[in-house]
Image (cartoon, rainbow, N blue to C red):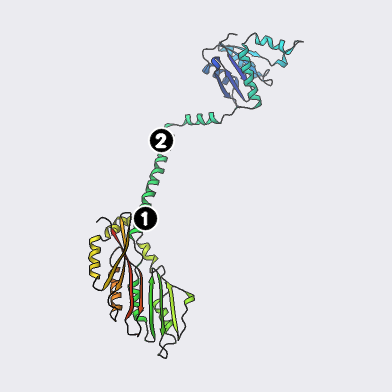
Amino acid sequence: MTSAAVTIAWTEAEVVLFGPESRFVRQPLAADDDRPALILETWRTEFPDIGAAQLLAGKELSAAPDVARLAQLAAAAGLRLEIAPPPGELRGPRSHWTAWRGVLSRVKLRAVVIGATLVGALLIGGWRWSTERERARLSRLTAAEREHELAQAETAEMSRRRQRADDQTRALLGVCSVPAQFQAEWLAAVATAVPPSIVLDTIELNGECCRVTGHTVTGAPGADGAVAALRQAIFGPAWTMDKSAAPQTGASFRLEAVAGPATAAGAAMAESRPDEASAARARLPDAIAVQALLSELAPGWRIEARGAETTLGIERRSYALAAVNRDSRAWTDVLQLAYRLKGIAGIAIESMALVAAPGENGSLEKAAVEVSVRLRAGR
């Protein structure tokens, strides 16, 4: 055999073809493959210019019909194939070295050593094909499959962009929106619900939390059930009552409750549609409109600015208002302020504290209101 030859190492599971310049090809063999034809095709495809080969077959294949058929196919194709039997099957009294010397005389020592090493690797450890299989899978991907994967990636990116836009829209709506403004209607209900047998001492509103304190007039008609009736009138089913603030008839009392979904959360949710973000911003007043409002309120209220912050292009300012008149007109001034502010987008009453003056003459010792104003920044 000439030096330009292919060494074929063949086992039941796979075959390795080793050619010149240390080039080799691995080919797995399945049970249902036409293995001689597959080996010959691999030889002719990978080494088309080499017409001679030596087969190193494992012991279990050395006398198998497939080996003989491979030799026949090679001969029919004009190729020359020599089969090297395993050393253990050489006959006669010769030593193992003498038996192998006949083989080594027909093939280069380098090719036999490398081929034997490959056979040993196949028999002992096997070949790892995961990388080759993945590479083959990728090479089989069609253009349509690649386009499909690209379309999926673009769809995912578009979905992420929409999510970011939705998050920004919801954030802008949250900045523009105000809590439900129930103070005006609730104060009007309190004014009509207080019977002559009850004197209110304080009314405090802090967000959705309300506290009413007072006392009953000793000996006044209807005093026994007046506090229970007042509680039912000003805190309906939508309110959550504080059980620890249960009234005591004939003495001082304290009523505490939290506004329920019907007055606060429900109204806030109605303003939370993402498609209203731009409209909600457009409804906000600008700095000129806010200044005009403060000038309008100034005769009846002392106004103190408490700071400002800007988020997403929306400026939020805080103001503390104290009533100038605290006589019998003060209650009316407070109601008018609550109704006036409720009709303006972006303005909310955050808290309110009303304290009755001594003497039970309807005047107020304190009338303080904290207000937040949302306006379009830079306008």
Q: CA distance from mark 1 to mark 2?
A: 36 Å
**Taking 273 as reference, is 204 above or below it?**
below
Query: Along the line of sight, which residue is nearer the eye, 163 or 196?
Result: 196
Q: Is residue 71 visible?
A: no
The residue that mark 1 highlights is 171
* Viewer-nearest of discs 1 and 2: 1
Callout 1 crowding tier (Cα within 10 Å): few <14, some 14–19, many ≥20: some
Describe residue 232's horizontal placement relative to residue 136 as left or right: left
- Disc 2 residue type (three-letter): Glu
**Taking 186 as reference, is 42 above or below it?**
above
Q: Which mark is residue 79?
A: none
Callout 2 crowding tier (Cα within 10 Å): few <14, some 14–19, many ≥20: few
The percent coordinates of residue 61 (x first, y second) are: 67, 20
The percent coordinates of residue 350 (x first, y second) are: 35, 67
Q: Secondary structure at mark 2?
A: helix
Q: Which one is earlier in the sequence, the residue at label 1 or at label 2? A: 2
Q: Which mark is residue 147?
A: 2
Q: Specify the quadrant that holds the C terminus.
A: bottom left
Describe residue 120's horizontal placement relative to residue 161 as left or right: right
- Disc 1 residue type (three-letter): Ala
The answer to which image quadrant residue 149 occupies is: top left
What residue lies at 74% left-to-right and 12% top-to-bottom?
95
What residue lies at 50% left-to-right and 31% top-to-bottom?
137
The answer to which image quadrant residue 225 occupies is: bottom left
The percent coordinates of residue 214 (x first, y second) are: 41, 81
Query: Along the line of sight, which residue is nearer the eye, 5 or 299?
Result: 299
The percent coordinates of residue 194 (x first, y second) are: 37, 82
Q: Is residue 230 visible?
A: yes
